């Protein structure tokens, strides 16, 4: 069932993104009097399609190959490679008959729509959900060292002092540690307090490459105090709002301490001390199951701040978030191009994207990922690769400079090279996803 949900989210997300992108090209072409022969979500290779209908001059449909999509504009050298149409004299409704400035607008319209969609999604999420974060101020600065964090030299229980010269307490929220200022840099000094002594941990040269492999969650996480939100069964004797303070004779302050301790008592019974209504209650012989679980849901006791935004204010917030994420991804791509990041770890194909969506359908998560991918597509489509919008933009700019368009044979070669590059990347990403996720 989880696989079905992942595939469903992937297909819905791609459908939205492709439809919006191609709709941008469609609207711009129509605005300048160009004839649009096809508007397809996904590709109809071999002229095989799942569904189509024709209205006016345009055939609208859904192809069988669920990656990408296209708008076929009359008189344009594109994925269709329609030599028969291009061999005829130019017609006034064709792309090739229009001035370069109009061609340029048509080419960037899809990118513009993806950018607008990303901003719109983040704006509506800000309006609907608000912005919730855990502030650094008034919360415990202790951290839990995760798998990669331990390799770097962090230890669970360390107290964060400074990050690259910036005092930890001056940050607004813990996730600021994972901004591009830290992740895209090398040899960053992180100062912690450990057993009363200051210790400096320096990130290595391959920091970003390793983070791309394991994710930021593998470095450090904030330690937090907890209580019982609700019990799964009544056998333990725990009640909602109980604060666990000890297991047998060991004091418990943070959730990670509780998890570590119960893992050593699998299939055994322990005494759990809790604070309940200001009194300390000892629950004797609480059974720990074979997985090291007691049977309750945890309530995070950290202070949180939720900021609500008005409808118009949310667009300002959404716009800021979108451009911030776009900047992060641009800097990440530059690092990839420079060789700082292994492309096998950074490039995601359909399988990888599906796993990011996850096997549980949570609308907030779905829209967050879809909005982020929309921004990434806007950036990627502007790359000067033939067959992508950026490649078409380059040919139009050449026409604007030279005063004449490139010849059909030249455009045909450029487009063929671009198609080979694009499908080579798709094949690489698919096989890379399979290897990364299943082997």
Image (cartoon, rainbow, N blue to C red):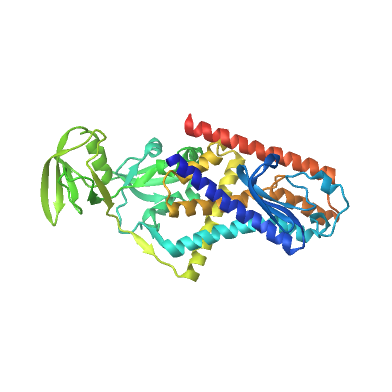
Residue furthest top as drawn: 439
| Residue sitting nearer the eye, 32 or 132 | 32
Image-based side of 372 in relation to 381, left or right? left
At horizontal 59% and vertical 57% (from top left) the residue drawn is 115
Image-based side of 42 in relation to 296, left or right? right
Where residue 426 appears, as percent x and y from the top left, is 62, 38
| Residue sitting nearer the eye, 131 or 232 | 232
Residue furthest right as drawn: 89
At horizontal 41% and vertical 61% (from top left) the residue drawn is 131
- The answer to whether any part of residue 313 appears in the image is yes
Q: Quadrant of the N terminus?
A: top left
Where residue 31 appears, as percent x and y from the top left, is 73, 64
The relative height of residue 308 versus residue 427 in the rendered view (above or below) is below
The relative height of residue 158 versus residue 269 in the rendered view (above or below) is below
Where residue 248 appears, as percent x and y from the top left, is 14, 39
At horizontal 70% and vertical 45% (from top left) the residue drawn is 385
Image-based side of 379 in relation to 196, left or right? right
| Residue sitting nearer the eye, 16 or 251 | 16
- The answer to whether any part of residue 375 appears in the image is no
At horizontal 51% and vertical 66% (from top left) the residue drawn is 316
| Residue sitting nearer the eye, 384 or 157 | 384
């Amino acid at each position: 069932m989880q696989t079905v949900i992942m595939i469903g989210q992937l297909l819905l997300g791609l459908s939205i993104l492709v439809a919006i992108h191609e709709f941008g090209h469609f609207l711009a072409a129509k605005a300048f009097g160009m004839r649009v022969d096809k508007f397809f979500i996904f590709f109809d290779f071999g002229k095989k399609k799942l569904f189509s209908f024709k209205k006016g001059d345009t055939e609208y449909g859904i192809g069988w190959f669920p990656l990408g999509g296209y708008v076929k504009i009359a008189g344009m050298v594109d994925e269709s490679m329609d030599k028969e149409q291009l061999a005829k004299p130019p017609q006034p409704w064709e792309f090739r008959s229009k001035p370069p400035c109009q061609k340029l607008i048509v080419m960037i319209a899809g990118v513009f729509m993806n950018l607008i969609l990303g901003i719109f999604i983040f704006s509506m999420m800000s309006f609907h959900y608000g912005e919730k974060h855990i502030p650094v101020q008034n919360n415990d600065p202790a951290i839990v060292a995760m798998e990669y964090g331990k390799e770097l030299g962090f230890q669970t229980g360390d107290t964060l002092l400074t990050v690259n010269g910036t005092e930890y307490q001056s940050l607004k929220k813990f996730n600021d540690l994972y901004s591009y200022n830290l992740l895209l840099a090398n040899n960053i000094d992180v100062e912690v307090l450990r057993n009363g002594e200051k210790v400096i941990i320096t990130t290595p040269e391959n920091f970003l490459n390793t983070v791309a492999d394991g994710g930021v969650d593998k470095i450090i996480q904030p330690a937090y105090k907890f209580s019982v939100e609700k019990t799964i069964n009544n056998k333990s004797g725990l009640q909602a709002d109980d604060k666990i303070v000890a297991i047998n004779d060991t004091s418990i302050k943070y959730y990670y301490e509780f998890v570590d301790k119960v893992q050593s008592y699998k299939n055994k019974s322990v005494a759990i001390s809790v604070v309940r209504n200001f009194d300390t209650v000892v629950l004797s012989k609480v059974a720990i199951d074979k997985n090291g679980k007691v049977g309750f849901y945890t309530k995070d006791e950290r202070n949180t701040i939720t900021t609500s935004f008005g409808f118009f204010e949310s667009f300002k917030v959404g716009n800021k978030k979108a451009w911030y994420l776009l900047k992060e991804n641009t800097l990440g791509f530059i690092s990839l191009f420079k060789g700082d990041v292994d492309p096998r770890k950074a490039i995601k194909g359909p399988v990888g994207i599906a796993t990011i969506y996850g096997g549980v359908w949570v609308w907030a998560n779905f829209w967050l990922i879809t909005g982020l991918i929309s921004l990434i597509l806007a950036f990627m489509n502007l790359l000067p690769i033939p067959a992508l919008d950026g490649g078409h933009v380059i040919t139009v700019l050449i026409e604007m400079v030279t005063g004449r368009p490139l010849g059909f044979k030249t455009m045909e070669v450029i487009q063929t090279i671009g198609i080979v590059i694009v499908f080579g990347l798709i094949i690489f990403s698919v096989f890379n996803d399979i290897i990364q996720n299943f082997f």
